Image (cartoon, rainbow, N blue to C red):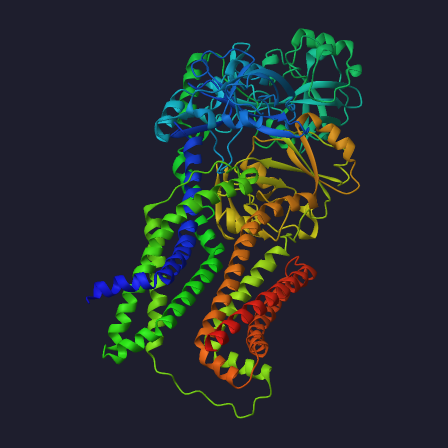
Amino acid sequence: MTRFTLFIRNVRYYGRQCLLLVLGAMLVSGVISTALYLGDSVEWTLRQRVEQRLAGVRSVAQWDGVRLAPGAILHTRGFVQTAAGRARAIAVYGLDDQAAAGLADREALANQALLDFLGGEAATAAGDLVIRVQTMPEIAAESMPGRPGRIRQLRVNLKGLLPTPFRDFSLEDSQNAPLNLFLRRSYLASSLECANGGNLAVSEKSADALQHELQNALTPEDLGLFFADMGGRPILKSRRYFLPEFVAPAFPEAQPVLSWFFAELADDAASLVYSFIAGVPEGLMPIPADECWLPAQLGLQPGAGPARLRYFQTGAFRDIMVSDASFARLRLVDDRAITRALSADIPGLTDSASCSQWDAPLPVDLKRIRDDDEAYWREHGAKPKAYIALSRAQELFGADALSGLLFPAGAEEDVLRVRLTALLRDEPGLLHCFEPRADALANALAGVDFAALFLGLSSLVMASALLVLMLMLRLQLLERHGESELFAALGFPANWLRWELAVELGLALVLGSALGVLAGMAVSALLLQVLGWVWGDLYGLSRMIWRCETSSIAGAFAASALLGLGALLLLLWREGRPAFWRRQWSRPMSGIADLSWRTVCRRQSQSRPLVALLTLGITLTLAVGANAIRTRGEEGFGYQWLLSTALPFTGPLPGQDSGKVLPIRVHLASPADCSNLSRVSTPNVFGVPLQCLGENAPKLTPAGAAADRGVLQWILKARLGDSLEYAGGSVVLEHAFAGSVFQGGIVVGADTFQRLFPDEHGAAMWLLRADADLPALTAALADHGVSLESSRERMARFDAIQNRYLLLFLALGVLALLLGVGAMALALARAMEERRDEIVLLAEMGFANHRLAAIFFVEQLVLLGASLALSLILLGILALFSALSLRLVFLVLSLLVLLWSVGVVMEVLVLVRRITNRVS
């Protein structure tokens, strides 16, 4: 007989046992491969989402304001109302005539995600859609001449899908599909009351090429700059009221001016109301810093006493105030060379033909307008009625701010325009061009490590499966112990016997590992459907793509095969070791319990793995099942309610002055809460008046930021001291909250927010005290897409996302516990097979079957008791740091002990009866 023939006959004879080994190896390999395939699938899905939202886009350019750049896209935010009455934010894009060919006014196209959200498929999604957007005024909403954007309701006819890959465009580092709506740009610009231009450009060119193209296309009109004429002298002004800071130094020959609108100017003999005042340089009028000059053409005779100026100022969130300034005296001046062109433009005010037609963004009492004021306005318009030194004007109205540059007489406007255009095209800070794909892919792959996550989640299952496999191997070796003795008696060397067993059993393990790798493909595909159901509504991953990498296949096969072969070689090595002497018991045995205890101690090497496995399985299952994550920390900082809007609101709200309402600015970049599976490099930013957060307020430097500890670790993948880069500057992470309502972004001070995002105005979030007037607040914000929730509800919503992960822990913990119980049953069968002679001896000594069963039952009870004791200790420690319900723990433990006891008693009785019957 050859070795091969012996191998074939052994496989046939021990076919059932070999099949069990193959299944055991399949279980280990299947768990490992499934975890790796799931990780590959989720990571591949995230990569595909990045490719989907950046399809056809290599570089992106963004800028402030609306410009007439070639191919520019007009982007704004809007919202639609859900059936439940809640506002859902959407992205609205205005496409130029070439990209929106065939799209008429009041017609819209969408991406598939928006169609799905609206409840229709592409072929049947035609119909009316109502969206709300906010107008885009050129002047900053929180400045004195500005006004907040108005809410416009647009009713459009939704025609279906946008036929270009751009339909899913988004710059958010998130796996959630954006909700995109596309309109004709001219129609959207008209609705937003802005120029027919854009604030975004995308290209298949490189970022440098796109920057060069757009920079060379810049014109003064793109930045709102234009020239007016003041008596033959060109004056450079801006539709945004203030000139950019870099313009004045480039024209040293020009005279800078700053105009402002005031409420009243009066001394003891003369007074003026609601007019412009201009700060002029010494070369235009040599006005002392403590004097104010009036036009002689007004016909006023100022007194000799001091004068008081009352002028408009705006604070944060357009809190309009009237400030006072005093001057030593008023004097008259001949200003016939000055015209209305010297005053900066304020829409609704300077373009009015008479004072009665004013639509000012300021609290003007038209009843105070006199006939002389009306006559002066009809003749001179917005010409200033008062002049002060430029340095004093900048001190009162805004440091270093200018509203115009007055050039010398005879300066040619065309030449000035060429110089200004060249200046703009050489200025590097007017465009932000970048290539998002590399960073987006890196963030997607550097997010949650799903392969490691699933391997960690299934570690107990793997340990249980490996223990089951080792028990199967041990039983196989026990069953073939007689065969080994026979071969040894025939003179075969011990090493030859161990080699033959290693080859036979090792081939079964390798075959099982290979089949497990294949079975893992089917199991992982099934689990993807389950994950889509569990995670779909939270993570936007209801449609995940199955994927397995070659490295995962090879790694799963190698790992499972090595584990199985390692377990086999360990057992074979232990089989060949000689038994060593054990210490004898010095005291007599007192009964069955004592005999069981001594047996457990004698067989502690076989008992330790079972105790450890049961302890971990019980602890994990009960800890997860009886525990729901409830973040404890700063939470609402003493505020009980939270308001948020889909569109920012600029203006004070009821209770804001009394501290009942805390407005918070929000810059939307990428959500950084636990629902985001990608790493986030530019999270949302909350601009908060830190002094209003009470004793838990973080102490931040002007460049500092704070974030929730979980966000810092899992979403940002950063540590304290790391920096985050934004287009307007960088911030340093300096503080970590234990848990707050600001999960989803980082917190910076109000001044830091203004430095980073100077062109973003208004608040989109408010913290409210318990005694705030909720009905009045929600009514004031109704048009902006308001939603209200308590701080506890918001924290519970964040915790619910994390608790979805616990479902996986719980399911895998239960599976590990079941495998542990199965391993315990196999261990019991193995122990009784090993101790057959002991059972026969005890039976011949007169022990009845129920007495023998009691011995084994007590042994198993000792093992379970040790596991339960260790589990309770661990659970007690966990209860100190979590919301663990110990009452539920004890209830589940009691049920577990009852079921285990019944099962063990029945199994022991069956096994003992089988052995004693065989002896008889």
Q: Residue furthest left?
A: 2
Image coordinates of residue 378 in percent, x first then y, are 69, 7
Residue at 53% of width from left, 13% of height from top?
228
Res. 293 visible in picture: yes
Residue at 68% of width from left, 59% of height from top?
888
Judged left or right of residue 576, residue 194 is: right
Depth check: 577 or 301 in front? 577
Which image quadrant is residue 487 in? Answer: bottom left
Res. 701 visible in picture: no
| Relative height, residue 63 to residue 356 (above, below) | below
Depth check: 730 or 389 in front? 730
Residue at 77% of width from left, 26% of height from top?
305
Image coordinates of residue 666 in percent, x first then y, are 60, 36
Image coordinates of residue 727 in percent, x first then y, are 48, 36
Depth check: 13 or 97 in front? 13
| Relative height, residue 604 to residue 374 (above, below) | below
Judged left or right of residue 289, residue 910 is: left
Report the quarter where the N terminus lies: bottom left
Q: How many labels were placed on the picture? A: 0
Q: Residue furthest front?
A: 920
Image coordinates of residue 880 in percent, x first then y, are 65, 63
Depth check: 377 or 492 in front? 492
| Relative height, residue 342 to residue 600 (above, below) | above
Which image quadrant is residue 513 in? Answer: bottom left
Judged left or right of residue 894, residue 473 is: left
